[in-house]
Image: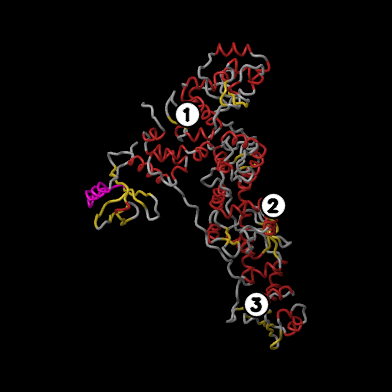
């Protein structure tokens, strides 16, 4: 194969599929789309782009990349494998992977790293300087080292493995003295690099290293996952997953009832988070669930108002538990869209079922996968911008990730569960419609209940414990809430008899009848506001209460009071006084509890550049690189368009878009007239553009393989 003279020349020999793969792995190369192969190669060689690509290398790929940057243009595969003390096949595979992402180009004996790689890795990628002008043989080096005393050898040893350059005054004029630097210069074991710098020549450094490029060995693959102690953890994982769903509903129902206000910066107030934390068991889990529900587009901040559930939430509630849970699981990696989080998710998904998962082990795997902790971790809350993340910080971060996975049920009892990659329901318990009502007015659900049962219980009883089998208690306030929502007493009795496994306790029946007798004894009409009382004596009592003056409460007729306050304020006042009023509409009908407000569901994240887009970009790049196919002169473009007008053939047309950026379309020419091109664009329909905006045109054909 002919040796390419540059990265651009090598890319010109690639297929459209290879170019699309390159732009998929290095996303910055495709946005905005490059105009030609030369521009693509120039972007790939830029230091900023090379930094992002290098940050995605694992430990072994990084080791080989440093080796090629140091030795690649002057060594064979066998020699490079010997310097790394690794099999040739492993080195060759790593070089191929580096070539696929355009960090390395060329062929054996003539490998090159892009200029951006050299900029990022620095002048001494493996701690080696260049060779001497007249390279010393191994025998020469051995003799000169033998002639050096201990002080000279100690000084040289400091330059062997890391930075081969050292500071020395008047370096180019020294060599006659008796200092270690002078002796080393006189023996040729050091050479001056500038007026104040000396370097250890490459051949001397390699000899002192024992023929190795690096002091330590690195693994070619991450450590394997360890097998857990338990044979199956799915049941425990399903329990955690079910509890997560119940907690999610608790949070959204509480938010829907209270509509908490955001802070000035748009975040959550600490007291609101503390309340949610008490509801689900911990502040950390509440913060995690709030973020997860926002990312799942079930909860959002309505601009200018408050936090509330979205329109998607009601549809989500009707889904089976597995479908609901998958939506939350798949949103996990988006909660804090950082490279480390996506890597951790990938690691969990590739691990075998029942693998032991610990923070230390996960951190070790992540350290192997991404040794360059600079740009890749600038968004991480545990890594300061521009600094490396420490092993301890990474372990702490891994601990928090494992805790979140445990809440999701993807980790249970210290092991990875099948839920991490489940695409079909692995056994979520079916919802039940029967409950147990006890004499102490508590109601126990033996497991997840159906949506209809959950909604009714949410009205009729107060929640006192969460989990798969939630416990609620019937109270006067909860029964009144059901009556406020429009339930009649006989309907409550009938529903409880239908869904209770046990007989309905007499105390509960008495409670319903007692609340129902008092419910509506006072009726509030929304005429800013009017209270109609069945018992005139009650009016005297209300007028004597503290606080009635602030409401502007006064009698207008026997059993009729009016207030300056709105109906809701009067309703709260009467309930605080121990009464159970109802609210009536202006026509006298019962005003039931209104449905909770919902925020409009936000749109999903933009899909970005798709694989199809990348193939189209790659095809256009190769086509522009074929001078036999492409025309760029104004007259030649018009002639090509006129020849194809009405023929039904497809052309690839480059033009300047209305936004002023280069764009490419595949189109059929309808007509060329009056300085304009009329065409049918594939996938977009008819369009008209000025001929002055055309850049190039060529016959469309499938990309070469």
Q: Is residue 257 above or below residue 44?
A: below
Among numbered discs 1 and 3, the one appearing first in the sequence: 1
Name the residue nearer the viewer: 487 or 227. Answer: 227
Q: Which residue is identified by label 3? A: 567
Q: Position of residue 357 (x, y in %)?
A: 63, 38
Among numbered discs 1 and 2, the one appearing first in the sequence: 1
Q: Quadrant of residue 40?
A: top left
Name the residue nearer the viewer: 557 or 31. Answer: 31
Q: Position of residue 517 (x, y in %)?
A: 69, 76
Q: Which residue is identified by label 1? A: 95
Q: Which mark is residue 256?
A: none
In contact (CB < 8 Å): disc 3 and disc 2: no
From which residue to which does the magenta span run? 634-652
Q: Position of residue 634 (x, y in %)?
A: 27, 48
Name the residue nearer the viewer: 661 or 605. Answer: 661
Camera sees residue 686: no
């Amino acid at each position: 194969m002919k040796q390419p003279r540059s990265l651009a020349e090598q890319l010109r020999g690639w297929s459209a599929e290879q170019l699309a793969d390159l732009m998929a792995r290095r996303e910055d190369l495709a946005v905005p789309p490059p105009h030609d192969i030369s521009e693509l190669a120039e972007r790939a060689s830029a230091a900023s782009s090379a930094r992002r690509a290098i940050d995605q290398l694992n430990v072994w790929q990084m080791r080989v990349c440093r080796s090629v940057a140091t030795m690649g243009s002057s060594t064979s595969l066998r020699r490079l494998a010997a310097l790394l003390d690794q099999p040739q096949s492993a080195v060759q595979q790593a070089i191929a992977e580096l070539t696929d992402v355009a960090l390395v180009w060329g062929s054996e004996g003539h490998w090159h790293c892009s200029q951006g790689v050299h900029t990022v890795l620095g002048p001494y990628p493996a701690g080696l300087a260049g060779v001497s002008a007249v390279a010393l043989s191994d025998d020469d080096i051995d003799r000169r080292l033998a002639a050096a005393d201990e002080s000279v050898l100690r000084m040289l040893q400091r330059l062997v493995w890391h930075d081969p350059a050292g500071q020395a005054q008047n370096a180019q004029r020294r060599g006659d003295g008796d200092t270690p630097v002078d002796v080393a210069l006189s023996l040729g074991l050091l050479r001056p690099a500038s007026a104040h710098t000396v370097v250890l020549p490459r051949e001397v450094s390699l000899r002192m290293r024992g023929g190795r490029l690096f002091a330590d060995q690195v693994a070619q693959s991450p450590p394997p996952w360890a097998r857990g102690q338990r044979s199956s953890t799915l049941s425990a994982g399903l329990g955690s997953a079910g509890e997560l769903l119940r907690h999610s509903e608790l949070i959204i129902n509480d938010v829907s009832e209270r509509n908490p206000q955001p802070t000035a910066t748009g975040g959550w107030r600490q007291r609101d988070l503390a309340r949610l934390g008490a509801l689900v068991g911990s502040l950390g889990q509440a913060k995690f669930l709030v973020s997860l529900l926002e990312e799942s587009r079930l909860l959002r901040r309505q601009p200018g108002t408050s936090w509330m559930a979205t329109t998607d939430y009601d549809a989500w509630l009707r889904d089976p538990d597995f479908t609901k849970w998958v939506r939350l699981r798949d949103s996990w990696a988006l909660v804090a869209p950082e490279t480390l989080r996506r890597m951790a998710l990938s690691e969990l998904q590739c691990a075998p079922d029942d693998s032991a998962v610990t923070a230390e082990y996960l951190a070790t795997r992540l350290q192997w996968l991404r040794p360059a902790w600079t740009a890749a971790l600038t968004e991480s809350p545990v890594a300061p911008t521009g600094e490396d993340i420490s092993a301890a910080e990474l372990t702490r971060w891994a601990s928090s990730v494992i805790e979140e996975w445990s809440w999701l049920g993807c980790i249970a009892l210290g092991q990875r569960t099948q839920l991490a990659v489940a695409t079909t329901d692995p056994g979520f318990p079916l919802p039940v419609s029967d409950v147990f009502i006890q004499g102490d007015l508590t109601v126990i659900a033996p497991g997840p209940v159906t949506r209809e049962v959950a909604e009714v219980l949410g009205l009729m009883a107060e929640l006192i414990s969460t989990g798969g089998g939630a416990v609620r208690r019937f109270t006067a306030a909860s029964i009144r809430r059901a009556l406020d929502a429009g339930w009649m007493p006989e309907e409550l009795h009938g529903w409880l008899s239908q869904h209770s496994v046990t007989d309905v306790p007499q105390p509960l029946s008495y409670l319903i009848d007692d609340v129902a007798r008092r419910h509506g004894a006072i009726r509030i009409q929304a005429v800013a506001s009017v209270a109609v009382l069945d018992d005139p004596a009650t009016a005297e009592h209300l007028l004597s209460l503290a606080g009635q003056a602030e409401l502007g409460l006064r009698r207008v007729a026997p059993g009729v009071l009016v207030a300056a306050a709105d109906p809701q304020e009067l309703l709260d006042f009467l309930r605080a006084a121990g009464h159970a009023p109802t609210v009536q509409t202006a026509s006298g009908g019962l005003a039931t509890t209104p449905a909770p407000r919902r925020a409009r569901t936000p749109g999903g994240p933009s899909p970005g550049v798709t694989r199809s887009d990348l193939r189209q970009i790659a095809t256009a790049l190769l086509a522009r690189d074929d001078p036999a196919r492409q025309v760029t002169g104004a007259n030649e473009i018009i002639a090509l368009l006129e020849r194809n007008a009405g023929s039904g053939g497809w052309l690839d047309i480059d033009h300047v878009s209305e936004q002023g950026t280069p764009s490419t379309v595949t189109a059929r020419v309808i007509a060329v007239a009056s300085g304009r091109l009329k065409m049918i664009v594939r996938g977009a329909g008819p369009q008209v553009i000025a001929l002055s905006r055309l850049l190039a045109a060529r016959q469309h054909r499938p990309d070469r393989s």
